[in-house]
Amino acid sequence: MFDEKMIYLDNASATRLDERVLEAMRPYFFDTYAVATSEFGYSQGIEAREALQKARETIASRLNAGPEEFVFTSGSTESSNMAIKGVMMALQKQNKNHLIVSKIEDFPILYSAKNLEKQGIKVTYLEVDKYGFVDLEQLKGSISKDTALISIQHANQEIGTVQNIEAISQICKEKKILFHTDATHTFTRLPIDVSKIPVDLISVAAHTLHGPKGIGGLYIRKGTPLTKWMDGGFQEFNRRAGLENIPGAIGFAKAVELVTAQENEQLISLRDHLISHILAEISQTTLNGHPERRTPQNANITFHFIEGESITLHLDMHGFAVSTGSACFSRSLEASHVILGIGGDHERAHGSIRFTLGRYNNLKEIDKLIETLKEIISELREISPLGKD
Amino acid sequence: MSKIKVNCCGETCPIPLIETRKAIRKASPGDIIEVRGTHPASKKEIPMAVKALGLKLVDVKEEGGEWTIIIQK
């Protein structure tokens, strides 16, 4: 029955919290629960501040950044809003009112861009190729004297394609344009070294790393102009008002510490096993995204002639949690903007399934999934009205 | 033991299956769920789901383009 021994393969949406993360957070709920205070405050507040600083150092060091360049937020949605709206607001005074994003960005970037358009900001939405890569020549050709910021994701949320942010950030540096990247699906899974890659702003979050929900962060290179958009206190180097989520920050840092190169290798091995067996053993399937330049945890496959919602529902009843590539789990029938963006038609977009792996998955589970999929896909194709001609 | 009625007439795939799942989740062991609908593919995929969940498919009948599926949790 539902939820019993569920095999969870939707780790890009949220992950199971690691017990070690919870243990690291626990004292900051029950013992050191004070607000972080200055040296003039009481001891527990100073302890809280020191713990927050240590967490900041741990996370920033994973980017090879200084702790003063890392601001905690409520998650990557806030981080990306803060980066895009903060930079555009700051540079509008210099008549820099042009923003460049790709068409397949995640919704915090796309809807921030759309919102800014209503306020008079010019936005260029770059096309991508069949794998989801931005064309660097098109990117260069889109830059104008008014361009303030380019925001291109490190990896795609649905198809896992990893962009060449090294080359993109170099273009930005040469043209003296700020560069933001959304690294929600790559942080700790793939290396980013800000001393080598001239990226100015990076959005990250804990919920994809077996850390807690509701905590994320924004790397802000020293000297980056950014208007503060949430007013109140002077927390987070006066970048973000509001009491710090100290247990969340501690949990985020612990989650970062726990991700190892060995774990990432294991995810790649499981991912490749899953992809190769599905493509070989189930007919009429297409891998979405690049076969190699993809995140260790992502496999996105279209099962032609069947709707993704039917597959997710039947997998749920067989004890698997996966997500559909399209946004139509509700009663709307809007297809995935990512699959459409890489040139897929509505049929391909509606039949795509995203499998995202995590720390607690193993080969036995993946083999069970492949066998179950073979059965479900065969039965659903028997009754599907699609592709019968 | 109670009887839960789900009317999906006029709805197309995957709505009847979603509504059936909702009813199954709410039902107590032994309860009867009666699903009515008109979408032909759903008539076939609801029994698939019932089998996957290990529930009892009591009856499937159709009259005048409207089908009724009876499930026991």
Image (cartoon, coloured by chain):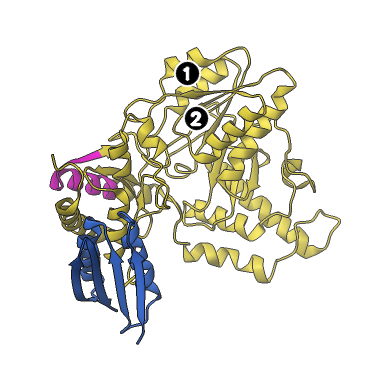
Chain colours: A yellow, B blue
Residue picked out by circle 1: A139
Image quarter of residue A24 = bottom right
Look at 36% across and 84% down and name the residue there. Answer: B2
At x 17%, y 50%, the residue is A381
Q: Is residue A285 magenta?
A: yes
Distance between mark 2 and mark 1 Cα atoms: 10 Å
User: Percent position (x, y) of residue A43?
Assistant: 79, 63
Element carrying mark 2 = loop
Q: Looking at the image, which is closer to me, A242 or A318? A: A318
Can residue A8 be seen in the rendering of this structure? no
Give the residue type that dot 2 points to: Ile
Looking at this view, is A49 or A199 the one in front?
A199
Q: Counting residues from the N terminus, which is met first, the one under dot 2 or under dot 1?
A: 1
Q: Are marks 2 and 1 in contact (CB under 8 Å)?
A: yes
Q: Position of residue A329 (x, y in %)?
A: 40, 52
Which stretch is magenta? Answer: A269-286
- In the image, residue A289 sits, relative to residue B46, either above or below, namely above
Residue at 33% x, 30% y: name it: A131
User: Which residue is tagged 2?
Assistant: A152
Say which quadrant the C terminus of chain B sits in.
bottom left
**Mark 2 neighbour class, 10 Å CA radius: few under 14, some 14 to 19, many 20 or more:** many
User: Could you say which quadrant of the image residue A380 lies in?
Assistant: bottom left
